[in-house]
Amino acid sequence: MPTAKFLLQTPYEKTKSGTKKPAGRETRIYCYLIFSKGEITESNRDLPNFIKIKTEYVIKPTEWDFDKQLRKDKLTGSIEFNRRLNKLKDEILNKYNELKDDPSHYIADQIKQLLQEWAKLKENPFLIREKSFFDVFDEFIKAQENRLAPRTIQKFNTLKTTLEEFAEAKPKYQLLTFSMINHAFMDDFLSHLMARKPRGRQKARPEGEQDGLLTDTTGKYIESLKTFLKWSEERGYNKSPIYREFKMFSTADKKRIKRKNDIVTLTAQELRDLYTHEFPPGSTLDRVRDLFCFGCYTGQRWGDISRFKKSDLDGDVWTFVTDKTKEEISIDLVGYAAPALDILKKYDYKLPSISLQKFNDYIKNAAAAAKIDTPTTLTRYVGSKEIKIINPKSEFIGSHCARRTCVSLLLNVYNMPITAVMEITGHSDLKTLQKYINPDRAARREKMSNTTPVTEPLTVKRNAV
């Protein structure tokens, strides 16, 4: 029986001094079936000294244990990675024995060719099912249509379109397969995203800074891609586990996003100015303003607002199941949220219908008309490049600004407990809620003014006897 060994395609690179060291870039892992002289018989005398079989796995030589021919034990994920390699080795040896003992009496060259073809089909099982990478992506999207919110489905469609553009732009990825998706692929894909020519919101940036998607946007692309690759792995299409090592953001990117991820919200006065601004009754801006303010007062997502039904209302309580999380939410339309009930009555409990794209265009016009024009600066990144976008606040207002405004005002102006706000918005994770908070600077100063310095004399109150 031959010996199976794993060897790297490009294990070393030369240094400036001419010596060799393990290469830093990923390289392919090959499995070699090596035959001893004792295994050469009359029936297989044409068998080569070895059969070279390409596997689906790649690795950085600096992470490779050349003695054990496996990934170094101390690295994260090595146990699973090495388990798969050893399993593959056993499968290759079993397949060789199966071909050698086949009644068809294959000659040596046939055994080599059949073994290599078997390994290739094992690496890309969707070829057996006559499905390409993008055929599998279509199947994935179709499978999610009845499970996920339309906006989430839209994200996956956008990712698929972007991957198709990437594959067309990069010749080596024109026939994209699951086995190609490794760290080298991710480097190329991120470079493609960070060099993308202006479209959509990219055009709103200053001249000369419009190329490339923002870092937080590329992170969402990676998150969506990992979701698809996990689904594909569970169904036998994707045999490479490398995607699990992909990160949404590098360590440096996380620090930039945490420090500079500005979030636009309206102050209490700005919301009041917008809500009370007199637009021509029944005009587009009048209806768009009302929809936006309804979101500010209830704190709900656009998708749930657009699905409002009168039957969901019981007196002044709006109860419904959210489209995104499928959880039941009850909103008391009293106090701060009371104007939402007035808006419903204005439209006889049937809110205006408008596409999200047009809504986001018109709400900027409505905010500008209401003089919500405070100079606002957003700091974003494309890779390590800092981009400052300075515009009147109205230019940054969109549908989600309403939800963020609700969170900010309830927490910072009305001092509502954060747990109560979470029940209203439907957030289950405190960290997720915190990123929507844009603290009201004036409100924070007022709260601090109401505190007492510790240097002042303390007054001791005694209970009356």
Image: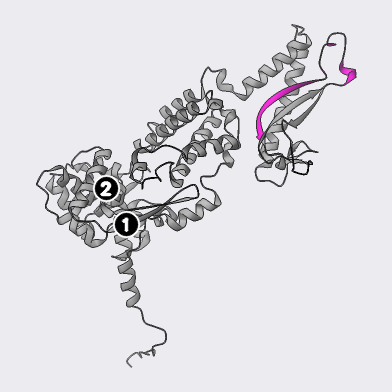
Q: Which three-letter amino acid code belongs to the residue tagged 1?
A: Thr
* Residue 380 or residue 104, whichever sits in front: 380
Q: How is the protein colored in the picture?
A: one colour
Mark 2 lies on residue: 319
Mark 1 lies on residue: 376
- Does residue 237 appear in this view? no
In the rendered image, residue 13, in percent from the top left (x then y), is placed at 73, 38
The residue shown at (62%, 25%) is 123
Q: Is residue 48 magenta?
A: yes
In the rendered structure, the answer to whether residue 336 lies left or right of residue 142 reads left
In the rendered image, residue 204, in percent from the top left (x then y), is placed at 33, 45
391 w.r.t. 154: above or below:
below
* Residue 89 or residue 10, whichever sits in front: 10
In the rendered structure, the answer to whether residue 76 lies left or right of residue 32 reads left
102 w.r.t. 286: above or below:
above
Please identify the quarter of the rendering in which residue 323 is found. Answer: top left
Please identify the quarter of the rendering in which residue 379 is found. Answer: bottom left
Q: Secondary structure at mark 2?
A: strand
In the rendered image, residue 185, in percent from the top left (x then y), is placed at 56, 34
In the rendered structure, the answer to whether residue 426 lies left or right of residue 186 reads left
348 w.r.t. 180: above or below:
below
Residue lying at the far right of the rendered structure: 38
- Does residue 402 appear in this view? yes
Which residues make up the magenta segment? 35-58
Q: Secondary structure at mark 1?
A: strand
For the residues carrying marks 2 and 1, which lies nearer the camera in this image? 1
Query: Dot 1: within a 10 Å radius of its alpha carbon, few (fewer than 14), some, or many (20 or more) residues?
Result: some
Q: Which three-letter amino acid code belongs to the residue tagged 2?
A: Thr
- Whichever of callouts 2 and 1 sits on the residue coming sooner in the sequence is 2
